[in-house]
Image (cartoon, grey):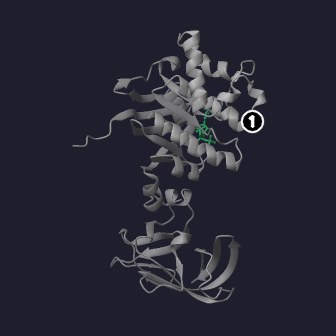
Amino acid sequence: MSSAPEEHLRLQEIGVSFGNVNVIPSLDLSVRKGEMVAFLGPSGCGKTTTLRVIAGLNKPSQGRIIVGGRDITHLPIHDRDMGMVFQSYALFPHMNVSRNVAFGLQMRKVSGRDAEARAAQALEMVQLGHLSHRKPKELSGGQQQRVALARALVIEPSILLLDEPLSNLDAKLRDEMRVQIRALQQQSGITAVFVTHDQVEALSMCDRVVVMRGGNVEQFGTPTEVYERPATAFVANFVGRTNRLKGRITSEGVLTAAGQQLRSATTLAPGAVDVLVRPHRIRLQETADAANEVQGTVSSITFIGDLVQYGVRVDDEEVVVEEATRRDRRPLAVSDKVTLGWSAEDTLVYPAGEK
Ligand code: ATP
């Protein structure tokens, strides 16, 4: 019999104010043991503040933080058993790599030899054993980042907190580090909370994603859930790109948009709605089994290697369609008349005007 996953970290009605400004009204969240969770959202939505509250760097104005069933709300930072990796790695410049990593252990009264051995092991884990005698300034940005990660992991913290640790790296290194951090987190079974404003990072690295907006949780779900079944128009817009058509639900419950009757898996009350459809979910000229079918005129074509992006004029709206490059069909041209088709499941409907 499988048991329910164990809860490790719980935020209960957490509120944060700076002076008179309340930036987190009341946030509830439960993270399971061994899970990696991303806080995703636009700049200023409260991701870092929430992470700092967990770490003990910010005091909540209300609410409780529970770790492993224990209330740690008022526990000082150094008693919280958390490892932290921040955007600026904050390594000690005068200490070599090995001493940087061992420092936290020495602070925890681990003996010199033990600390050295464990630091060496942590550096092997991030594949930097061979650079243990270098000073931070003799390392690349990515290597410094890995030292910071080793330093956080070596103390075997109960929870690992990462605040945009990849934002200073170039694209290639960032891709590598994503895979590496995720592998290390899974191997060690550590619970991790990760702050990012990069949706690819959140979707690709984490078990679940908290989409935040204005200090509130807009949606908390697996990457597939937030992408395929966004709870709000905001989530649909923030996580992946989408088309937005003005629509209406009649008093008979019929959905119309782009001058057509459409089918959707969502039901809403009659009134004005926004209909959202992702560009890559729309098919061109192949609509035999599509629940929704509309006519349009190609207005622009952008070739981006593997993909072609079409702008299509439908009724008085512009729809973006993304298609894999094809050789089995005559290339489309601007002013071509086309048929667009998509399924009812891919027709997301929200009350009108939701941002
Ligand atoms: P970013 O992606 O830009 O880092 P974020 O989602 O992490 O943004 P926070 O840094 O948590 O956002 O900030 C949330 C809000 O709280 C913002 O409006 C910010 O201006 C405000 N804020 C953060 N720290 C302080 C502070 N020390 N004093 C006053 N306001 C603050």
Say above or below: 297 vs 70.
Answer: below
**Front residue of this view, candidates 313 and 69:** 69
Task: Say what secondary structure mark 1 lies in.
Answer: loop
Say above or below: 80 vs 209.
Answer: above
- The image quadrant that residue 348 belongs to is bottom left
Q: How many marks?
A: 1
Residue 265 in the figure: left or right of residue 4: right
State the image coordinates of residue 80 (x, y, percent, origin top left).
47, 21
Q: Quadrant of ligand 1?
A: top right
The residue at 59%/25% (across/down) is: 151
The residue at 34%/76% (across/down) is: 253
Q: Which residue type carries mark 1?
A: Ser
Residue furthest out toward the left: 1
State the image coordinates of residue 207 (x, y, percent, origin top left).
45, 46
Say above or below: 304 vs 176.
Answer: below
Q: Is mark 1 within 8 Å of ligand 1?
A: no
Residue 54 in the figure: left or right of residue 270: right
